[in-house]
Amino acid sequence: MTAPPIPSSKRNIKEALIEEAKKAFALSIYFGLWFCALAFLAVTALEERPIPLSIFGFAIVKAAITAKFMLVGQAIFPIKVTKHHGIVRSLLIESLIYLMIVLALNYLEAGIDGVIHGRNFIESLAAFGQSDPLKILAMSILYWLIVVPYLVFTGALILMGKDNFIALLFGNKNIADQ
């Protein structure tokens, strides 16, 4: 006995959801590696011993939240790359827009977190980044430097197509070495 075929529209929705879940997972891993490395750097700079493993858990949670924010940003403002302008020029403005979206959502997260913990929403927003403009600027630069390679990777994937991009990165087994 075979299962009845899945209608095309349901299959397309299911495939789209699976594709989005894969993107979210991959982006969470990417941000997770960065945030764990930064947390490790921070704790070793403070010469804290033993190194608390909880910092890595927080880094991974923060990475998943940031990935979610990035994907929300992409849903609102999809990535557009043109061959005429190239990847970097096409994505420069978009990278700054994604940075602003991620920062805005981080502020919102700080406000909601404050409310959850019994604090005032506006005061919690203002306390983001310990209310230090230089810390927020430094965090913004770091987020931007983390986001740009992801956008370049995504832009190359869009321009080249999945098969060509994979062949560029890992070689193409279908083509004999010349």
Image (spheres, grey):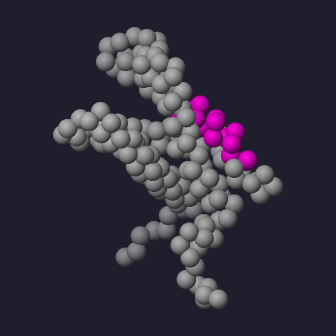
Q: What range is drawn magenta here?
A: 89-104
Residue found 54% across the figure and 55% down from its top: 16
Q: Is residue 79 above or below residue 133?
A: below
Residue found 43% across the figure and 38% down from its top: 65
Along the viewing direction, whichever of 127 and 5 lies nearer the viewer: 127
Asked if the magenta segment contains residue 26, the reply would be no
> Left or right: where does residue 17 sit relative to residue 154?
left
Camera sees residue 94: yes
From the top left corner, tell me how far across and down residue 114 is, in percent: 37, 18
For this orientation, the residue located farthest to the left is 50
Q: Quadrant of the C terminus?
A: bottom right
Residue found 39% across the figure and 37% down from its top: 62
Q: Quadrant of the N terminus?
A: bottom left
For this orientation, the residue located farthest to the right is 84
Asked if the magenta segment contains residue 94, the reply would be yes
The overriding secondary structure of the stretch rendered in magenta is: helix
Camera sees residue 111: no
From the top left corner, tell me how far across and down residue 35 is, in percent: 40, 42
Q: Is residue 134 above or below residue 35?
A: above
From the top left corner, tell me how far across and down residue 26 is, in percent: 45, 54
> Left or right: where does residue 9 sit relative to residue 47?
right
> Left or right: where does residue 50 sit relative to residue 114?
left
- Numbered circles on residues, count: 0
Residue 161, image quadrant? bottom right
